[in-house]
Amino acid sequence: MNRIPRNFQSRSQIEQNWMLDNTWCNNCNEAGIGMKNPVEYEENGIIFVEGQCLRCGKIVRSEITDKIFCAQRH
């Protein structure tokens, strides 16, 4: 696995907030709990944001796709 660091802070505040709020935690088995300490990276051509669940502190990881934001931009 070769992670290529990306700059999460370069995204618009709207995108950052949406990504931080709309998460799934496998440990809590619940969506929308949120994450803190986000790190964005690319791995095998796929972009991810990873951080800590706001409830349990376990690692949560979400794949980022442009499709997510298409509806919000219009």
Image (cartoon, helix red, strand yellow):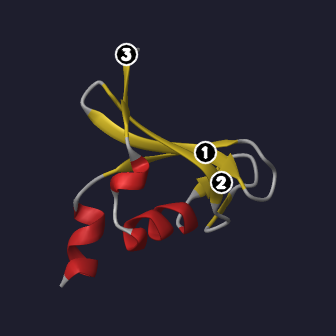
Q: Which amino acid does label 1 sit on?
A: Gly
60 relative position to 1: left or right: right
The residue furthest bottom is 74
47 relative position to 19: left or right: left
* Residue drawn where x is 20% and y is 72% of the image: 70
* Residue drawn where x is 81% and y is 51% of the image: 56
Q: Is mark 2 on a helix, strand or loop?
A: strand
Q: Would you say the residues marked 1 and 3 are in contact, meaning their CB atoms lie under 8 Å apart? A: no
Find residue 60 and report its horizontal and vertical position in percent.
61, 45
Q: What element carries label 3?
A: loop
Q: What residue type is labelled 2?
A: Lys
Mark 2 or mark 3: whose residue is earlier in sequence: 3
How far apart marks 2 and 1 lie (CA) works out to: 6 Å
Q: Would you say the residues marked 2 and 1 are in contact, meaning their CB atoms lie under 8 Å apart? A: yes
Q: What element carries label 1?
A: strand
Image quarter in which the C terminus is found: bottom left
Mark 1 or mark 3: whose residue is earlier in sequence: 3
Disc 2 designates what residue?
A: 36
Find residue 45 and report its horizontal and vertical position in percent.
24, 30
Name the one closer to the observer, 28 or 44.
Answer: 44
How far apart marks 2 and 3 lie (CA) works out to: 23 Å
The image's mark for residue 51 is 1
The residue furthest top is 1
The image's mark for residue 2 is 3
